[in-house]
Amino acid sequence: MSIRDSEAKVSKSPHKNNLNQSDELITIDLFSGSGAVTAALKEAGFQVAVALDNDATACKTYRLNHQEVDLRETDICAVSVKDLPRIPNISLLVVCAPCQPFSLQNQKRNKDPRSKLVLQSVKFITEFSPNLVFFENVPGLASSPEFRKLKRLLSPIGYKLTRVRLFDAADFGVPQRRKRCVVMASKSKSAIKLFNSFTPPGIKATVFDAIGKLPVLKSGEQDSQDALHKARQHKPIVLERLQHIPKDGGSRSSLPEHLQLDCHKRMGETQTYSDVYGRMKWNDVAPTLTTGCTDVTKGRFVHPDQNRAITLREAALLQGFPLKYKFSGNSSSIARQIGNAVPLGLVTQLAPLMKNMISLAKGDIS
Ligand SMILES: C[S@@+](CC[C@H](N)C(=O)[O-])C[C@H]1O[C@@H](n2cnc3c(N)ncnc32)[C@H](O)[C@@H]1O
C-alpha cells in the first residue's frame, strides 16, 4: 500500500479527534503494531491520542480494538510531524522500534537499515516535548551506534536518558521469559533518578496460570467458541515425535534415534535450537514467544501435555492480551503480531512508575 493510500485510509478512520485538552496522560504510541502497549496503557488510565505503524494487518487489528485512536498507517520516515494534530500537552511518547536490527541472533544486524528507525523518534520529541519518552527494545539496542546517536541528538533539546535497564518480563507477572531493554528520556533529573532506582516488582505467573484452563484440543481441532484456539494439523511424523517428548518440559533429546532429524543429530544438545520440539512446563514461565510461536520446529512451543503446538489463543494469553482482544489476518500474520508485541504486563507494571516520572517532569510533585 502506498503512503498516499494509507493516508487516505487514515482520513476515513472513525477516530474521534476530539481530545479534551485538559485530559492528562495523553500519549503518542510510535510503532504501535497490533496495539499491545496501547491496550496496557489504556488499562492503566493513559489516553492514547495518536498511534503509528506501517504494517497493514497489524493496523487492522489495532483499529478493531482502539477505534478512538487516530492511527496513522504509514512509514514513520515519511511522516511530517507538522501534519499531525496539534496536541499541546503530551505526557508520554512510546517508542517500540523494530528489534530485529539489534538482536544478537541476527547475523546481518550491522547492515539492517531498520536500525535507524529508532532515531525517527527525535522529530516527535522535538515537536511535542513529551514529559516522558519510553523506549523498549532488545538488550542489543544499548550497545548499538544508533543508541549513542540518540543520546547525542537528545542532549541539545534538553533530554537526558536514564540508565539502560535490562528487565525480564517474567519478573513483572508475565508468564514468559523475555529479556528486554527499557530506557526512558526526560528533562527532569528527579524523574531520571526515580527510574534508575526502580526495582522490578518480582510478581510471578506460570504457563498454567495463563492457559491451564483452556479446552483440550487434538492436532487439527478447533474450539467451537474461539476461532483463535485452533490446533495446527501436524503431519503423522511430527505427531509421532510429539508423543515421545516427555510431558511438562520434555525435550527432543528424548526422541528415539529413528525419529531424530539428521540436522538435529549434527547440532547435538549443546547447540542452539535445542529448544526445538520442546514442551513448555506448567509450573514455569514460557520461553520468549517469537513470530514462529505456534510452530514446534521454531522453539519450545509444544503444549505442556497435549501433542500439538500451542494455539494462537494460548500465545496471545502468554503475551498478556486479554481474551476479548480481536485479531485480524491469517494465522501466520497473527503469530507475527503476537510475537512482535510488548508483553502487556510489563507495561502495566511500569505504568505507576511512568505516572510518577511524568508528575515529576510536570513539577506536580518534587
Ligand atoms: C516491536 S513491534 C511493535 C510492537 C507494538 N508496540 C506492540 O505494542 O505490540 C515494531 C513495529 O514497528 C513497525 N514498523 C517497522 N518499520 C516501520 C516503519 N518504517 N514505519 C512505521 N512502523 C514500522 C512494525 O510494523 C511493527 O509493528
Image (cartoon, rainbow, N blue to C red):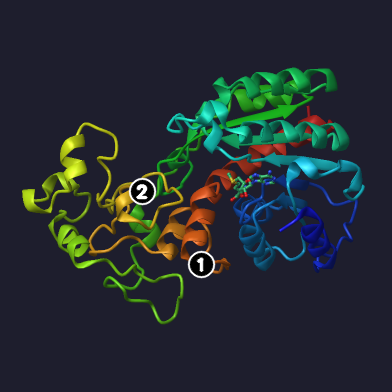
Asked whether the residues under the numbered discs 2 and 1 touch, taking CB atoms below 8 Å apart as contact, a structural biologist would say: no
Q: Is residue 268 visible?
A: no
Q: Residue at x 64, y 43 (%)?
A: 351
Quarter of the image containing the N terminus?
bottom right
Of the two numbered discs 2 and 1 in the rendering, the one whose residue sits closer to the viewer: 1
Label 1 SS: loop
Q: Residue at x 19, y 59 (%)?
A: 242
The picture places residue 308, in percent across and down from the top left corner, at 27, 63
Q: Which mark is residue 41?
A: none
Residue neighbourhood size for the residue with mark 2, other residues' Cα within 10 Å, grouped as few (<14), some (14–19), many (≥20): many
| Left or right of 125 on screen, residue 94 | left
User: Where 312 falls versus 37 (above or below)?
Assistant: below
Instruction: Name the residue tied to disc 1.
Output: 330
Label 2 SS: loop
| Left or right of 334 on screen, residue 113 | right
**Three-letter code, disc 2:** Ala
The picture places residue 32, in percent across and down from the top left corner, at 66, 50
Nearer to the camera, 137 or 366: 137
**Three-letter code, disc 1:** Asn
User: Where 331 falls versus 93 (above or below)?
Assistant: below
Q: Residue at x 81, y 69 (%)?
A: 14
Quarter of the image containing the C terminus?
top right
Q: Which mark is residue 286?
A: 2
N-terminal of the pair, mark 2 or mark 1, is 2
Q: On the image, which quarter does residue 153 sit in?
A: top right
The picture places residue 42, in percent across and down from the top left corner, at 68, 55
Q: Is residue 236 visible?
A: yes
Residue neighbourhood size for the residue with mark 1, other residues' Cα within 10 Å, grouped as few (<14), some (14–19), many (≥20): few
